[in-house]
Amino acid sequence: MLHAVVPAGGSGTRLWPLSRAQRPKFLLPLTGSERSLLQSTVERLGHLSDTDHVYVVTGAAHAVDVARQLSHVPGDNILVEPSPRDSAAAISLAAAVIAERDPEAIMGSFAADHLVPDAEAFAETVGKAMELAADGLLMTIGITPTGPDTGLGYLRLGDPVGPGHKLAAFVEKPDQVSAVEYVSSGQYLWNAGMFVWRVDAFLDQLAKRKPQLHQTVRRLAEAWDSPQRESLFAQLWPTLEKISIDYAVMEPAAADGMVGVVPGTFKWDDVGDFDTLGQVLTGDAMGNVTINAGDAPEPLLNESKRNVVVSAGRRFIATIGMDDAIVVDTDDAVLVAPRDRAQEVKAVVEELKARGRDDLV
């Protein structure tokens, strides 16, 4: 049985104004159904884990919404961070808590805001990773590239091992020329940030690479069910280094031959911006994708093609002769932009912060 961990953090700034700091994208219905990305992720993990083996790591600001959306997940399995300390702290805490309950457990970590339509193919791939994790390797799941993407990190394959490969190296986001070379070689996969390992093997590597982080999360996990938990968190959590799990553990462990990778052929998207959303969701006959995340009437899109229109308020939206655009309407903000500039939405959020308009972010 897999102990499935779902890190649920981040604010999804490229999906502003729909995604906000207080209601980030993983809580929103961006799956083409009424389910949120978080609910869809946990439902997908049902092919691998019972609900009492599912854990969510989230921030204090989102704990109530997470618990409400996942009412079937035990409350003790929702691990609440007092403040964000990046993925190494979040995932390491979950590993330590699981190790207290089941020292030989196999754990998987899967982000709350990814879209994977084929749950069976996903479960099959995770099963292969579990085979190699049982032998002590720290496993990651790479996605077979469908094209040269410069917005993703890559995994370079090493020697074959079992149903996968040793991982030769983690590779940072490339430029366009390098991305084409990577995909053409057949030796690289997209880094989707999915991990599988035995908790004891991971914690051994954590102790070797980041001993202070290891000591702290083990101490917090030991006190998890005690009255001292709150005071220990207040004392110890702010001292933890802000660092990603890749940099803290996975990259140095890969350099020592301790990391493996299994290729996943299932469709995967990280739903990073509105243009991506328009690609992964089914549109109408004119290629328009509409999402109703509020109480607005159906939009009217006259002679308009390939638009992404999100209604998150009560207003009626109409377009005439508009193509390849993004229109997002909320109660307090409206975004209009060309789809090919979807990545620049993040800059709007940064400008609002610079102006002191935290009420809008």
Image (cartoon, grey):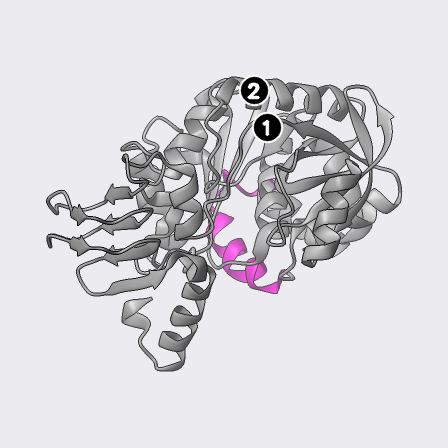
Say whether residue 110 is left or right of residue 29. right
In the rendered image, the vertical position of residue 174 relative to residue 103, given as above or below: below
Residue 117 visible in rendering: yes
Which quarter of the rendering shows the C terminus? bottom left
Judging depth in this view, the residue of 69 and 298 nearest the camera is 298
Q: Where is residue 190 in the image (x, y as percent from the top left)?
A: 66, 41
Q: Nearer the viewer, residue 276 or 8?
A: 276
Judge left or right: residue 16 versus residue 110. Answer: left
* Image position of 26 (left or right of 186): left
Disc 1, SS: helix
Check residue 1 for magenta coloring: no
Residue at the image position 63 percent from the left and 30 percent from the top:
107
Residue 5, picture quadrant? top right
What residue lies at 38% left-to-right and 44% top-to-bottom?
278
Q: Which mark is residue 101?
A: 1
Q: What residue type is labelled 1?
A: Arg
Instruction: Name the foreground residue: 105 vs 225.
Output: 105
**The N terminus appears in which quarter of the rendering?**
top right
Residue ID for mark 2: 121
Of circles 1 and 2, the one toward us is 2
Specify whether residue 59 is in view: no
Rendered position, 124 above or below 317: above
Which residue sits at x=74%, y=26%? 133
Query: Residue 249 at x, y = what percent?
Result: 75, 48
Question: Earlier along the polypeptide chain: callout 1 or callout 2?
Answer: 1
The image shows residue 77, relative to residue 330, as above or below, that is: above
